[in-house]
Each structure stands twice: as C-alpha cells, then as structure tokens.
Image (spheres, helix red, strand yellow):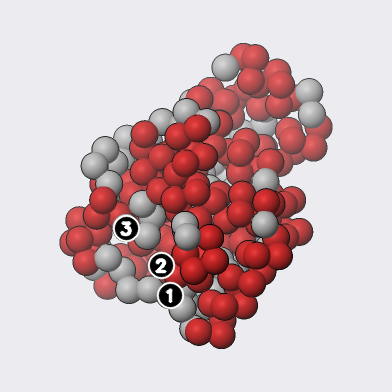
C-alpha cells in the first residue's frame, strides 16, 4: 500500500484527481482527506485498483464517448448511498463497481471506434439498448467484454460480478446484493438522464434485484435527491 501511495504521489495530475475523487460526494469524506497515503489507507487495495482504472480511462471516456464518465460517476454516487443504507461492509467497493461497470465499452471503443459508433447509431435508429446493438455488431456485449477484462486483470470476484452482470444481476452468485445495487443505480441514473451511456434506453429494473434491494418509493426519492445534490455540488460530476 505504501508503494502504491508513493506511485500516485509521484504524479501531480493523478494525485490531484485521486484527492478530488476521495473528497467528492461519491465517498462521503468531503474536504477531509488531504493526502494520498490517507486515501489509500481508507480505501484498501481493491478500491484503489478500481479507482486508478476509472481515473486512467477518464480522458478516453471524455474524448471517445462524451457523457459516459458523468453516467459512471452518477452510478457510483447512487450505489454508495444504497450500499451504506443496506449495511454493506465495503460500500466504497460497491461505488467502484458502479464507477467501472461500463469498462467494457471503453475497451470496445478503443479497439473498434468506427464499429462502436455504428452500434450507437443502430441503438438510436432501432430504439433499443446499446447492449442489444453491441450484440448485433460484435456478438458480445460490453458487460461480457468487461467481465473478461476484469478476470484477466485478476480483479476480486465481487467486482467481476458487478461488471459482468450489471444487466443480469440475477446471475450473480458471489455478490448478488452488490450486483443488484449496481444494476439499480445504472437504471436510475439512465432514467434520470444523467450523462450518456450509449443510448437513451432505460430498461425496467430486474424484478429479482428489486425484491432483493427492498427499496420503497421514499428510498428512491431520497436517492434522486442525493444524485441531484452531488451533481450540483460537484459542478456536473467533473473530475
């Protein structure tokens, strides 16, 4: 952990982004963390790995698919709030799962930008989800690609399932609650219209996930308020 903190601290731009993120609404430590070593100690290795991945692809997200980072940060805010409410032991790890749940899209865009552009156009023309359009173009969805990448990079099983099953949370075996949280957060942020995830399609919440989460109407309204407040305070989720 000391080596990781030293590595981050050696890069001023990365240090600034890490400190801005840890003091943002995503993590609930507003203005209280002043050093990278403190942030690393609070997070733990799994969260740090996920966060560094998220930050490292930030520029790619902004350049190649405007709005994806805003969508991802919105999901992280909502996911952490739900995880804390449900008593999840590591709510920060759930927030990281939500932050990088669409990492498969970044990989597809980096490798096949023209084809992915065609998938976005197809989703808009047919009024279907980007996942359905991806399947037509690539034979695989971003969730499957993201899951492959997470396994290849030896991410912990909890993160692997949150990434791979965020559209099909009922398939999660190791982290069903965490995956259901990321799934619901994705749907809620899409429905609210924050950012752009490749389409304008907001699917229905998976019934099994909704039953597992056991959220009331007041809970959903509270989450929307948290989302709005965090966006207002951060000036649009910029990092």
Tag nearer the camera, 3 or 2: 3
- The residue lying at 62 percent from left, 77 percent from top is 121
Judge whether 186 appears above or below 40 on screen.
below
Residue receiving disc 3: 168
Task: Say few, some or many: other residues with alpha carbon within 10 Å of mark 2 (under 14 / 14 to 19 / 20 or more).
Answer: many
Q: Which mark is residue 202?
A: 1
Residue, x 70% and y 18% (percent of image)?
A: 6
Quarter assignment of residue 5: top right
Look at the numbered disc 2 and give the secondary structure of its residue: helix
For the question of whether residue 84 can be seen, the reply is no
Q: Nearer the viewer, residue 14 or 161?
A: 161
Q: Is residue 64 left or right of residue 207?
A: right
Q: How far across and how far down the image is residue 159, in percent?
A: 42, 39
Q: Earlier in the sequence, mark 1 or mark 3?
A: 3
Quarter of the image containing the N terminus? Answer: top right
Q: Which residue is mark 2?
A: 187
């Amino acid at each position: 952990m000391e080596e990781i903190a030293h590595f981050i601290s050696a890069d001023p731009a990365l240090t600034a982004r890490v400190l801005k993120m840890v003091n943002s609404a995503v993590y609930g430590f507003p203005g209280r963390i002043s050093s990278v070593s403190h942030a690393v100690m609070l997070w733990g290795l799994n969260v740090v790995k996920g966060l560094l991945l998220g930050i490292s692809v930030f520029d790619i997200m902004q350049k190649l698919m405007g709005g994806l980072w805003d969508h991802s940060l919105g999901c992280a805010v909502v996911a952490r709030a739900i995880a804390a409410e449900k008593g999840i032991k590591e709510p920060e790890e759930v927030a990281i799962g939500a932050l990088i749940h669409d990492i498969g899209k970044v990989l597809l865009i980096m490798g096949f930008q023209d084809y992915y552009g065609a998938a976005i156009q197809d989703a808009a023309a047919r009024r279907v989800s980007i996942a359905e359009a991806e399947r037509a173009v690539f034979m695989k969805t971003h969730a499957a690609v993201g899951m492959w990448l997470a396994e290849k990079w030896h991410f912990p099983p909890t993160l692997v399932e949150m990434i791979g099953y965020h559209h099909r949370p009922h398939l999660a075996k190791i982290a069903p609650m965490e995956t259901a949280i990321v799934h619901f957060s994705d749907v809620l942020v899409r429905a609210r219209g924050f950012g752009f995830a490749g389409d304008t399609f907001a699917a229905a919440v998976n019934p099994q996930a909704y039953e597992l989460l056991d959220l009331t109407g007041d809970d959903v309204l509270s989450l929307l308020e948290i989302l709005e407040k965090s966006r207002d305070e951060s000036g649009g989720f910029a990092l």
